[in-house]
């Protein structure tokens, strides 16, 4: 498809992840014969906010300036929704790509949101708790006019957690003069956070594993699972996989990984990370391995749950897993996708596989708006229902178009958004 956007090209958002997201979009837009005017609008985010702000280090004589971002890809479907990432290499292009993926994800599971994403370029492991609080409150103040329960609702992502969401909620509430829990999701339950939100992404991911295994003709009883990334998504995915009766043989985080062919005790590893912040020094009765080794280790199911671009053209040919469940956003490059498809590896794509997080975030937002809170069993039951319905729908698109699950998921998400845009028309 010809690139028609505003002459200047896409320089503002250009980054490897954005170009990949765009390539995926263009391919599917062409495949489904998407209206060119709509395609042109969807290729770029509606709002991109870049802020710079200072924060005081703990000794109070040192002031450092940081870059922060918030990108809202699509305002057609309702408020926008998406996580906030604290990482040393965050940039506008990465955040824009993730915001676009959020749009498709919300449409695939049928949530009334457009996609958004935010980030601060900072190493979260280098910040003390009080520094994290000051960074969070100032970043929130910088983007405060663009967020709100009916505008844009942030959530946790890499490097942020329930406590960060609590500080955002408090900063926002101080400004508007009343308590406003619905401005963020992924808060502590004491502040109107939903029970089961913490576990939702990992749990949702693993809830699709039996359906994926059926597609791949795999018996899950005693199957071996490797998990890349042991943060919010990875640890609860590993735990859910263990509870399902699989053997979690390898886990890793930024400090490296560990392998034990007999199976690791996931709860032991979780307790270790709670105490030491990372897996560094943990052996779990097995051997230390590198992150690169984990990705290609002998296993049946690989769950990349850390960061983007880790399954690449260089290692895709060596991956032993027959199923890849994408917990992270954008873990597989386009080159890797082609190789995996050719090799018959079943990839359950991020925009479907990790949608459990935003789904329970949606439940949290609804509960906050109504001040009426649901039980854990209601939440888990509704999550399972939405995830399995989305999987079935994507699978039937894949069967009809004789294509892979990523293409099918994109077809489904993009079609829903295009229908809504056509119905609303162009203002004025
Ligand atoms: P997190 O910060 O809680 O955990 C990230 C984990 O990945 C940590 O264990 C960290 O040490 C590890 N890690 C970071 N960089 C790494 C690297 N280069 N190599 C190996 N390990 C590395 O973050 P999270 O919330 O678990 O998010 C992880 C991924 O899942 C991200 O891609 C995020 O966008 C995606 N995601 C998160 C949610 C959610 O609800 N939190 C929902 C959907 C998707």
Image: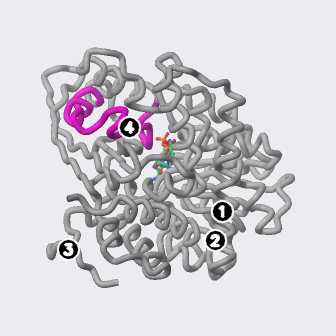
Q: According to the image, label 2 marks what residue?
A: 397
Which quadrant of the figure contains the N terminus? Answer: bottom left
Q: Nearer the viewer, mark 2 or mark 3?
A: 2
Which of the 4 image quarters holds residue 73?
A: bottom left
Which of 110 and 102 lies nearest the eye of the viewer? 110
Magenta stretch, residue numbers:
136-161
Whether 258 is drawn above or below 17: the answer is above
Q: According to the image, label 1 marks what residue?
A: 393
- Disc 2 crowd, CA 10 A, few/some/many (<14, 14-19, 20+): many
Residue at 21% across, 29% down: 141
Q: Earlier in the sequence, mark 4 or mark 2?
A: 4
Residue 153 got which mark? Answer: 4
Q: Nearer the viewer, mark 1 or mark 4?
A: 1
Q: Earlier in the sequence, mark 1 or mark 4?
A: 4
Q: According to the image, label 3 marks what residue?
A: 9
**CA gap, disc 1 and disc 4:** 27 Å
Which of 355 and 209 lies nearest the eye of the viewer? 355
């Amino acid at each position: 498809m010809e690139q028609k956007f505003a002459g200047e090209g896409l320089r503002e958002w250009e980054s490897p992840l954005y170009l990949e997201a765009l390539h995926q979009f263009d391919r599917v837009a062409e495949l489904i014969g998407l209206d060119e005017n709509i395609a042109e609008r969807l290729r770029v985010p509606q709002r991109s906010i870049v802020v710079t702000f200072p924060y005081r280090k703990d000794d109070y004589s040192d002031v450092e300036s940081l870059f922060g971002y918030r990108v809202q890809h699509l305002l057609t479907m309702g408020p926008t929704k998406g996580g906030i990432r604290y990482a040393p290499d965050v940039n506008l292009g990465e955040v824009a790509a993730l915001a676009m993926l959020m749009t498709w994800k919300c449409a695939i599971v049928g949530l009334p949101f457009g996609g958004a994403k935010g980030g601060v370029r900072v190493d979260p492991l280098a910040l003390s708790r009080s520094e994290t609080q000051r960074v969070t409150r100032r970043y929130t103040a910088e983007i405060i006019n663009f967020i709100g329960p009916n505008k844009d609702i942030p959530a946790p992502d890499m490097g942020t957690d329930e406590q960060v969401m609590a500080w955002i909620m408090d900063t926002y509430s101080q400004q508007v003069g009343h308590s406003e829990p619905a401005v963020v999701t992924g808060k502590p339950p004491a502040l109107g956070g939903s029970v089961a939100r913490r576990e939702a992404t990992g749990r949702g991911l693993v809830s699709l594993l039996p359906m994926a295994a059926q597609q791949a003709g795999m018996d899950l009883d005693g199957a071996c699972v490797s998990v890349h990334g042991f943060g919010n998504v990875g640890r609860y995915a590993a735990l859910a996989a263990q509870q399902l009766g699989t053997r979690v043989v390898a886990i890793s985080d930024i400090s490296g990984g560990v392998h034990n062919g007999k199976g690791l005790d996931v709860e032991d590893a979780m307790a270790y990370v709670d105490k030491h912040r990372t897996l560094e020094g943990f052996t779990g009765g097995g051997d230390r391995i590198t992150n690169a080794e984990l990705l290609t280790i002998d296993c049946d199911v690989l769950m990349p749950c850390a960061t983007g671009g880790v399954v690449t053209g260089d290692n895709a040919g060596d991956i032993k897993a027959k199923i890849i469940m994408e917990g992270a956003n954008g873990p597989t490059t386009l080159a890797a996708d082609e190789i995996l498809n050719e090799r018959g590896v079943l990839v359950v794509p991020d925009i479907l596989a990790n949608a459990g997080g935003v789904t329970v975030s949606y439940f949290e937002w609804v509960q906050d708006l109504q001040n009426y809170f649901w039980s854990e069993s209601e939440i888990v039951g509704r999550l399972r229902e939405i995830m399995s319905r989305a999987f079935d729908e994507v699978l039937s698109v894949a069967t009809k178009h004789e294509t892979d699950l990523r293409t099918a998921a994109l077809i489904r998400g993009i079609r829903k958004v295009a229908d809504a845009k056509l119905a609303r028309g162009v203002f004025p």
